[in-house]
Image: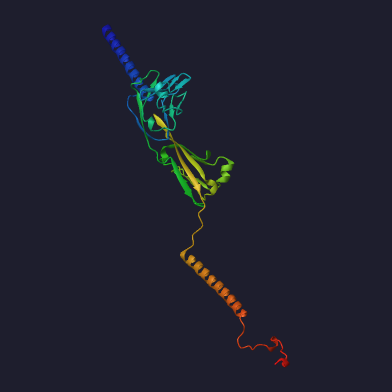
Amino acid sequence: MLRSLGAQRHITSGSVVKMIHVFNLLSWLLILRVLGVTGTDVPVSVMEEDSVILHTGVENLTEIKWYFNKTRIAQLNGNVSFICTDNQCINGTERFRGRLKLDLKTGSLTIMKINKTHSGEYQLVVDGIGNSNGGKILIITVQDNPAVYNQVKKNPGESVTFNPGVRRDIIVVMKCFLNNILIAEITGGQSQICSNVQCKERFTDRLKLDSETASLTITNIRNTDSGNYTLEIFIRNDTHFSITREKTFSLTVVSPPPSRLSGGAIAGIVILLVVVAAVVGGVIYYLRHRSDRAAQPQEGVADDPSSHPLRDMGDS
C-alpha cells in the first residue's frame, strides 16, 4: 500500500516536472516567435524611397542588436542607443548614414528613404535570444519605383486626381501635402479636408477625398493650384514590418494658347485684304491720272489774240 502510494507520488511528481518542461519550451518558442527570431526568413518587397520600420514585437526592451548581412548596424543598451556601431557600417559605402532611427522604447528600427543598396538580410538579437548567425527575421528586396515623381499639366477649369497607387484596405493613414502644407488626411474610416482657414478658403468646395480609393480630386483648378503635391501613405502594420510610402506629383496649371483660326477664316481675311488692296490701288491710279490730265493743254481751243503783243501797223 505504501509502495503504491510512493510510486503514485513519484509518477505524479515526474508528470509535473515534464509538464513544467513542456510549458517552458512552449513559452520559449512563443517568445522566439513574438520576437521574430524563429529562424524562418520573411521575404519583404519594397520600393525605392519607401521608409521601412522593422518591428521587434516587444516593448520595454533593455538590450537589442540589429544586423544587416552579418554587420551590426544598430544597438540599444537601456536608454543608450548606437547607430552604425561597426566600421563596416560607418566606412566604405556608408549606405545607412543618416537613414536609421532606433525606437528607444520598442527597439524597432526605421530605414528612411530606402534604396537598392539596402537589399539584404536583416537579423535581430534581443537580450541574448538568437545571435548574429541566426534568428533571421527579414530579407528585404528593394525594387525600382518609377512613379515617385509625376509631372502633371492641366488647363484652368479642369479637374485633376492624385491616386496613391496602393490598395485602400492596407492603408492605415494617408496625408496629402501641397508644398509641405497638409490639405487632406484619411485615418481609418475618418477623412478630413483642409484643417486650417487659409486652406479652406483656397480650396472651397473644390477638394474631394474618396474614402474607398483614397484618391484626392481637385475640381475647377486654377493657376494658384500649381505646386508639388505629396501623398504620404502609411501601409498596414505587420508583425515584422510596416512601410511609409511617398508619392509626389508636380502640378502645373497653364492657360491654353489662343485658338487658331480655321481655314475658312484665313481665306476670308486674305480675300478682304486683296479687295482692300485693289480699292486702294484704284483710288491711287485715279488720282494720279487726274493730275496728269490737268497738266496738259486742252485740245480744240484757239490761241487768245490778247496773249500776243500788239504790232504797229506802220512797221509793215
Judged left or right of residue 231, residue 30 is left
Q: Of 253 and 283, which appears nearest the observer?
A: 283
Give how far across and how far down residue 259 sits, in percent.
Answer: 50, 59
Quadrant in the picture for the N terminus: top left
Does the rendering let one see residue 188?
A: no
- Quadrant of residue 25 in the image? top left
Q: Nearer the viewer, residue 143 or 2?
A: 143
Tell me which colouring the rendered structure shows.
Answer: rainbow
Seen from the viewer's position, the closer of residues 128 and 45 is: 45
Would residue 162 appear left or right of 144 to someone viewing this image? right
Task: Give the residue drawn at x 49%, y 65%.
Answer: 266
Vertical relation: 299 (above or below) 32 = below
> Residue 112: percent from the left, percent from the top?
44, 31
In this rendering, would 14 be left or right of 86?
left
Which quarter of the rendering shows the C terminus? bottom right
Q: Does residue 169 show up?
A: yes
Q: Residue at coordinates 32% horizontally, 14% vertically from top-left?
A: 17
Give the image location of residue 298, x and y in percent.
Answer: 62, 84
Residue 309's place in the image compared with 270, above or below, is: below
| Residue in the image at 54% along x and 48% along y | 223
How many numbered badges does the structure rendering display?
0
Q: Position of residue 138 (x, y in %)?
A: 36, 28
Residue 177 as seen in the image, left or right of residue 90: right
